[in-house]
Image: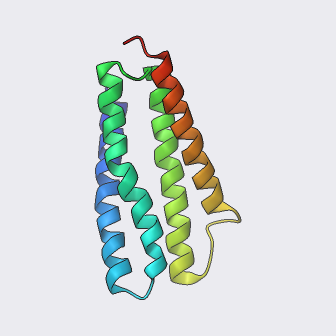
Amino acid sequence: MIADRLLTVLGCLFGAAGIGLMALAAHGKWPSIDYAAIMVLAHAPALIAIVVAIRSGLLHVLLARPAAFLLAAAVALFSADVVLNAMTGERLFPMAAPTGGTGSMLAWLLIGVSALMAKK
């Protein structure tokens, strides 16, 4: 399914972005960027694992797939705000990082519920 491929590609993009952000944090003048790097690096394999779990029947597809997209969006929001703030002192919008963090926590809870709802 195209949604699973998109989630897999997002996981790969998160992995690449995380490595780039770690390098920037290590060699640049913005060490606080490592928070964004950790967030995207932690969720890169998670997005791919969620796809595998959906396809194997360990997660209920109708809940897990939208939750995975919420997770990707929330992590991207959190990380983008952290990077922007570190580099410019500006924010995407007020409470952007906390909104992303809260969204990612909600997504993980929904993925957990989808495991309870799975048929396998």
93 relative to 27 in the view: left or right: right
Residue 4: image x %, image y %? Answer: 33, 32
97 relative to 112 in the view: left or right: right
Task: Identify which residue is drawn at 62% across, 49% down.
Answer: 102
Extreme right residue here? Answer: 94
Which corner quadrant holds the N terminus? top left
Task: Identify which residue is drawn at 33% across, 32% down.
Answer: 51
Task: Identify which residue is drawn at 49% across, 16% down.
Answer: 117
Which corner quadrant holds the C terminus? top left
Task: Identify which residue is drawn at 34% across, 63% down.
Answer: 17
Badge count: 0
Residue 11: image x %, image y %? Answer: 33, 48
Q: Nearer the viewer, residue 73 or 57?
A: 57
Residue 23: image x %, image y %? Answer: 30, 76
108 relative to 95 in the view: left or right: left
Instruction: Write down the quadrant of residue 33 in the picture.
Output: bottom left
Extreme bottom residue here? Answer: 29
* 30 lies above or below 55: below
Colour setup of the view: rainbow
Instruction: Write down the quadrant of residue 50 in the picture.
Output: top left
Residue 107: image x %, image y %? Answer: 54, 39
